[in-house]
Image: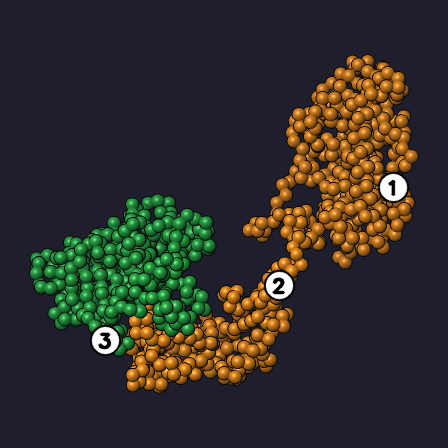
Amino acid sequence: MIHFDIWGPISISSIHNHSYFLTVVDDFSRYTWITLMKSKSETRQHVIDFITFTENQHDCHVNIVRSDNGPEFIIPQFYASKGILHQTSCVETPQQNARVERKHQHILNITRALLFQSHLPKNIWSYVVVHVVFIMNRVPSPILNNQTPHFLLHNQTPDLHHLKVFGSLAYASTLQANRIKLDSRARECVFLGYKSGMKGVILLDIHSKQIFVSRNVTHHEYIFPYKQSSSNVSWDYHTHIAQDYEATFVTNIPSPTETVSDISQPPISTSANNQIPSPSDTVPPHSSLPVVHKFTRVRSSPSYLKDYICNNFSTLSSKSVNSGISYPITHFHSFDHLSPSHIIFSISITQSSEPKTYKEACQSEHWLKAMNDELKALTANGTWSIVDLPPNVKPIGSKWVTIKLRAWIFLKHKAGGSIERYKAILVAKGYNQIEGLDFFDTFSLVAKLTTVKTLLAIASLKHWHLHQLDVNNAFLHGDLQEDVFMNIPEGVFSMHGKVCKLQKSLYGLKQASRKWYENLTALLLHEGYCQSSSDYSLFTLQHNNDFTAILVYVDDIILAGTSLTEFQRIKS
Amino acid sequence: MLESSGLLGSKPASTPLDTSIKLHQDTSQPFEDVSCYRRLIGRLLYLNTTRPDISLVTQQLSQFLNAPTITHYKAVCRILRYLKNNPGLGLFFPRASETQILGYVDADWAGCVISRRSTTGFCFFLGSSLISWRAKKQATVSRSSSEAEYRALSTATCELQWLLYLLKDFKIHCSKQPVLYCDSQSAIHIASNPVFHERIKHLEIDCHLIREKIQKGILRLLPISTHEQLADFLTKPLAPPKFNQFIYKLGMINIYHGQACGRILKHNNTTEMETALIRDQQQEERGGLQLLAPQVTEAKH
């Protein structure tokens, strides 16, 4: 059973001079077909065509045709030849033809919505109506047990992957034959629906106002180029983006009214010139069957992205990274609800992120100061001398390290939220060192923990004083016997061909801890201390009745003994 | 450790090792994140510095570093849950104690299921402060439990000798002769006299080191009943009541436990004034009271 009705005429005829459309609704599936018409007289032929179309395409015969009393539907000879019962409504009772009348209401509701959203001129309505029917046939309905009309008719679920927002921005690639190397590769367009019978989309060129079909299109569904800048009604979640685009389009479209007048004429002429058929002219819209098979190729993200999680692949291809994100994190996580002081605190925490590279560190005054301090200290210590690079020597590199071992060690947040201490350390890339050439032995012993416990137990027993020392920059005190050449660190003005010849050891060198240990041992022995043979990191001094023990664990030192004056002497 | 392993909300356990589980190279499902397991064991080994109570289980679990299974990982989780039970537990070094070294030696004969090797366990006290302990699988298989104990004795003797050298370097004079307690009568007999030749003739010569040391009078070897054997916790997993008893005997206290401190102080017969004095001294970092626990050292930093 088929329902027919004509809608129209409308005062604004479409850009192709259509004023009417014929709506056909299938009673069982509620599948809707639509045919644009310039005058009512075309109706009769369209009805006959449609009935032939269904017989051929769906392999079934139309039993009943229901329409109003319009004379264009009265074709008794044709109905009789097909054996079709023609039912008409009574005079002045359109509710008897309710199926299709209700459909009209539905179609026009969505049409208005799409026009408002896209801000396209009203004479585009013919494209909108066709697109609306396309959508309606793919929307499930409760009266169809939540099936879609498309499913009931074709017995297969429609593919919705290629659905795009009507009136949104799209870039169509220009034809290869018509462009030279320096021409733009794409045209800025507006999406106007699908071309039935073709695997392509209908587009309206924003600049030339030409309507054409293309299949090489990049869609930007959240951008509506025709949106007025004065309009406050907008999709709030991408307002700023739309406005960004406004700026670029303002020159192209001076005013909405002008756009309408602009757009109304050229398409017909251009489409004639370029032999790009306008959809409603050539292919009857009701032959929308092939549309189903559009874009059957499965779209997959490129293989280089397979190791990453991409929420929305289209974000990557879009010009503006923000534009494709439908649920930006700022909607779910924002500082808006915090009190002002809390905001300052949160920002101060997030701001104090550690720089990753030297360049990043240079951005911050504090880090620059920290690095300068370190360089000054190194120079004062005589860590290196700048020499010419000897031949056949490959210098090792160096690196700035800003360590965040413990937030309360290096980055001390004061109550106000400012950071107390920045520390930058210059580290040599010791992993490039070659054994036998720039280092020999690396073994450096540490105190045995049993010794530590014994010392503490004895100190407790004998009521000794206990002090703990932490040597600053311990490794920088070791003297190097080997020739180690290092590239001039970043931040030092350098001439080509010059390198640093290290005099003192540096963090990162393989022999650094050994050199420090040797240096300390020599110092303590010189001070009269006795190295214990049971634990070589233990040094003792018996002076009259005073006894002092020093236990060394790399740069941590435990001092234990009876005399505080001796402690002071050693510390100094 | 609890936070990084995601066990912060887990239920605390009273002992580090389930007495019913015998850890060995089992056939259960392999634990996939091997590096995570190794990292955890490494941390536990470091924690061994101040926590003798987990040394046995760490010794056992560190044998499976190359191919841990789910069972082993569960055992590690059990240790972490045990640590959660009393994170403040640490060694207590009382200021009033004698300068005598007391050692306890024990062995778990054929403790390893696969290799049938025994485990040595010993701990040394300086007066009443625990300073050294060890749980280690022996290098060779022992034919009898006395042999395993004898091997353990010789290992402990080496440690004792080293401690004595260390004390000498500290210019500490031991008031009494060092004592080594062993709960195996036959091992003591072997150490004292060359008896049981038939059963111990295969023993390596270096094991007889202890005999020489005893004859020189460096140490005394005394028998002890199994119930008072303090090295027991280093050779076999214990049930909760006995385990807690051991913790107490080892001189470990929980610094977060106010009563524990009070008990220790009372134990030392100090008056309230003295307690205050000690507290002041502690603040001045003078070695009055020494609590060895990771929390304390961190606080000092």
Q: Chain B is drawn in which colour?
A: green
* Residue of label 1: A268
**Amino acid type assigned to the residue bearing label 3 in the image:** His
Q: Is residue B121 above or below residue A265?
A: below
Report the mark closest to the observer, 2 or 3. 3
* Residue of label 3: B173
Quadrant of image for the C terminus of chain A: bottom left
Q: In which chain is the residue bearing label 1? A: A
**Amino acid type assigned to the residue bearing label 1 in the image:** Ile
Label 2's element? helix
Q: Is residue B96 above or below residue A257?
A: below
Q: In which chain is the residue bearing label 3? A: B
Q: Distance between the residues labelled 1 and 3?
A: 113 Å
Which one is nearer the viewer's eye here, A499 or B300? B300
Indicate the chain coloured orange by its letter: A
Query: Given contact means CB atoms under 8 Å apart, are the residues at marks 2 and 3 in contact?
Result: no
* Residue of label 2: A348
Q: How crowded is mark 1: few (under 14 residues within 10 Å), some or many (20 or more)?
A: some
Q: In which chain is the residue bearing label 2? A: A
Where residue B275 appears, x then y in whole percent?
36, 67
Where residue A557 appears, x then y in whole percent?
39, 74
Q: How far apart are marks 2 and 3 (CA)?
A: 58 Å
Which one is nearer the viewer's eye here, A485 or B282? B282
Q: Is residue A42 visible?
A: yes
Give the side of residue B112 with respect to residue A195, left or right: left
Kindly indicate whether the residues beneath marks 2 and 1 are on one polypeptide chain. Answer: yes
